[in-house]
Image (tube, rainbow, N blue to C red):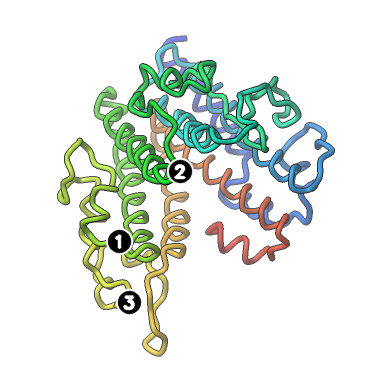
């Protein structure tokens, strides 16, 4: 299929999927279901598996992930040579799989084996035991899963070949952070290699995603871990390999590292002040990372839907589609957990930023 035909197919098919998805006004339907079985029936045409509640909830979440991945790969496969950026997006699951495999390596039941009954309409998925499921993104995977448990062979030849041993428990968090940082930086580098038309269509969206991710990560480290600016800067994603507070991807996050978390006056003139939790002169104020995350999420969804429809015949279609559908996936996870834990509908909606 030539590029023009592939673009036309992808836009038409992606639009059809979005029209049936629980995004925009339709997302509210997810938060109206009363049981996990009702949620399954809303999302899938296949019969629900007969499992205890905890396993059923896990099966539902994995099924939703696999459906998202299958749909994206179907769209991506329309291109004979899909761009590095839209391929890099789906490889976020490789990064997540690697984290999970490394964390599971110490378990007695951590050999990869086919897993059944989780993914409607599809064959086996690799399982790590104890309910852990590897998300298969073949033929776009950058990892050699068949080489497990030899992690050096799993990652050999990939952008994460440096991850060549099972980390000690105390190293796991730092290496997970490095993987997250590398994925976002790699997206930016892939964008710079894209054809001009695609780069111009997608650049603002990708930059916005990385900038906001850096901001939220910096605020979480300030609030929850009381990290100093010197400790936070190396943990941000940059456009290059150098730690630079003036880097276009890290500048906004670096700017707030010295802001006191309990002083609204210090934040009120900031570029992203509209995302802050409300302030009242009668109540002590502290910046709320959760509130900011939900504010960014709500605001971004409107922008992404606009980009999807305004940039046909570019990589912006699949880029926007990926982030829109990933938000839907996060909402499904939120609803699943709220039903399992008997959390109220309104509380679940607020947590998801709906």
Separation (CA) of disc 2 from disc 3: 34 Å
**Residue 199 can be seen, yes or no:** yes
Rendered position, 293 above or below 101: below
The residue beneath circle 3 is: 262
Q: Which residue is mark 2?
A: 169
Q: Is residue 310 left or right of residue 136?
A: left
Label 3: element kind: loop
Cα gap from disc 2 to disc 1, whole angstroms:
21 Å
Q: Earlier in the sequence, mark 2 or mark 3?
A: 2
Residue bearing the label numbered 1: 227
Q: Residues within 10 Å of mark 2 (few under 14, many from 20)?
A: few
Indicate the position of residue 279 as horizontal and vertical percent values: 39, 79
Residue 292 lies, in percent from the top left, at 41, 62
Name the spot of residue 65 as percent of width and height, x first: 60, 36
Measuring 62% from the left and 40% from the top, which residue is drawn there? 21
Q: Residue at x 41, y 71 (%)?
A: 277
Q: Is residue 321 visible?
A: no
């Amino acid at each position: 299929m030539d590029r023009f035909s592939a673009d036309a197919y992808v836009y038409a098919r992606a639009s059809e999927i979005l029209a049936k998805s629980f995004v925009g006004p339709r997302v509210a339907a997810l938060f109206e279901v009363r049981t996990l079985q009702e949620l399954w029936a809303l999302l899938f045409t296949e019969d629900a598996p007969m499992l205890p509640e905890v396993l059923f909830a896990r099966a539902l979440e994995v099924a939703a992930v696999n459906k998202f991945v299958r749909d994206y790969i179907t769209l991506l496969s329309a291109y004979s040579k899909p761009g590095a950026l839209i391929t890099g997006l789906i490889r976020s699951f490789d990064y997540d799989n690697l984290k999970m495999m490394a964390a599971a390596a110490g378990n007695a039941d951590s050999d990869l084996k086919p897993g059944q009954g989780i993914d409607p309409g599809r064959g086996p998925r690799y399982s790590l035991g104890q309910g852990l499921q590897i998300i298969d993104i073949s033929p776009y995977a950058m990892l050699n899963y068949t080489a497990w448990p030899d992690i050096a062979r799993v990652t050999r030849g990939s952008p994460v070949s440096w991850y060549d041993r099972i980390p000690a428990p105390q190293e796991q968090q730092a290496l997970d952070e490095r993987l997250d940082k590398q994925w976002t930086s790699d997206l930016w580098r892939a964008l710079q290699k894209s054809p001009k038309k695609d780069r111009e269509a997608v650049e603002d969206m990708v930059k916005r995603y990385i900038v906001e991710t850096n901001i939220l990560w910096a605020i979480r480290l300030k609030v929850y871990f009381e990290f100093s600016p010197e400790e936070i800067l190396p943990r941000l994603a940059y456009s290059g390999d150098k730690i630079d507070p003036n880097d276009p991807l890290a500048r906004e996050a670096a700017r707030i590292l010295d802001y006191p978390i309990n002083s609204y006056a210090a934040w009120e003139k900031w570029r992203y002040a509209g995302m802050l939790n409300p302030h009242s002169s009668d109540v002590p104020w502290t910046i709320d990372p959760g509130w900011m995350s939900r504010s960014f999420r709500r605001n971004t969804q409107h922008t992404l839907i606009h980009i999807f429809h305004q940039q046909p015949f570019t990589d912006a279609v699949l880029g926007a589609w990926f982030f829109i559908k990933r938000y839907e996936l996060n909402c499904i996870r939120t609803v699943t957990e709220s039903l399992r834990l008997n959390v109220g509908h309104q509380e679940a909606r607020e947590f998801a930023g709906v």
